[in-house]
Image (cartoon, rainbow, N blue to C red):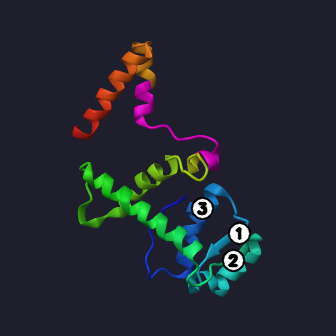
Amino acid sequence: MRFLPCHKEDSAMDTTLLFWHNIISTCGVPKIIISDRDPKFTSEFWTNLYDLLGTKRAFSTANNSQTDGLAERLIQTMEDILRRFCAYGIEYKDHDWVNLSPAVQLAYNTFQHSTTGRSPALVETGWNPLFPLDQLWKHLLTIHPQPNISMKCGRELATQIPNA
């Protein structure tokens, strides 16, 4: 899942470049793109791009509870993650969520989802990204090879991190 900042005023070309730089460049060309009927996705430019790339175009139907529900749930999840970041004192000056979106994306993509039993990162790449705490945990195991001692140290450190 990618959380990409964009604006209502973005043109079809702006949207295409955003898509190219953030999706195609890292994931390759998708077989299908599901979008609403916004002119940004229905323009002649996008139609030609779909044809050139061999990508099938599918539109969500208006008021489709399944498609709309998934999008709304994702937006709600993103807002919830942003609130949690802010609750731990991470600066959210002037509602500048754009600077937090990479951290939100990482949090979302490394969280195990109930439908798959895996994180989106694991499903997409076959592995989960490491966090600083993962590296610290590995180091603690070399200092305290007994798991119960390492776990106690890890828990103590984890509770102190938000206060740091």
| Residue 2 image offset from top left, x and y in percent | 52, 60
Q: Within the magenta stretch, is there residue 164?
A: no
> Residue beneath label 1, please?
32
Instruction: Say if 84 sits above or below 131 in the image.
Output: below
Cα separation, mark 2 vs mark 1, equals 7 Å
Kindly indicate whether the residue at mark 1 contacts the one at mark 3 (C-beta within 8 angstroms): no
Helix or strand or loop: what does disc 3 sit on?
helix
Instruction: Give the label, 3 or 2, closer to the camera.
Output: 2
| Residue 108 image offset from top left, x and y in percent | 47, 53
User: What kind of residue is marked 3?
Assistant: Ile
Instruction: Give the label, 3 or 1, closer to the camera.
Output: 1
- Disc on the earlier residue, 3 or 2: 3
> Residue beneath label 2, please?
58
Q: Within the magenta stretch, is there residue 136?
A: yes
Prevailing secondary structure of the magenta residues:
helix
| Residue 144 image offset from top left, x and y in percent | 40, 13
Instruction: Say which residue appears at 44% left-offset and 38% top-offset.
Output: 131
> Residue beneath label 3, please?
23
Cα separation, mark 3 vs mark 2, equals 18 Å
Instruction: Say if 79 sits above or below 39 in the image.
Output: above
Q: Which residues are magenta?
A: 122-137
- Residue 101 is marked as none
Helix or strand or loop: what does disc 1 sit on?
strand
Q: Is 138 positioned to the left or the right of 15 in the image?
A: left
User: What kind of residue is marked 1?
Assistant: Ile
Kindly indicate whether the residue at mark 2 contacts the one at mark 3 (C-beta within 8 angstroms): no
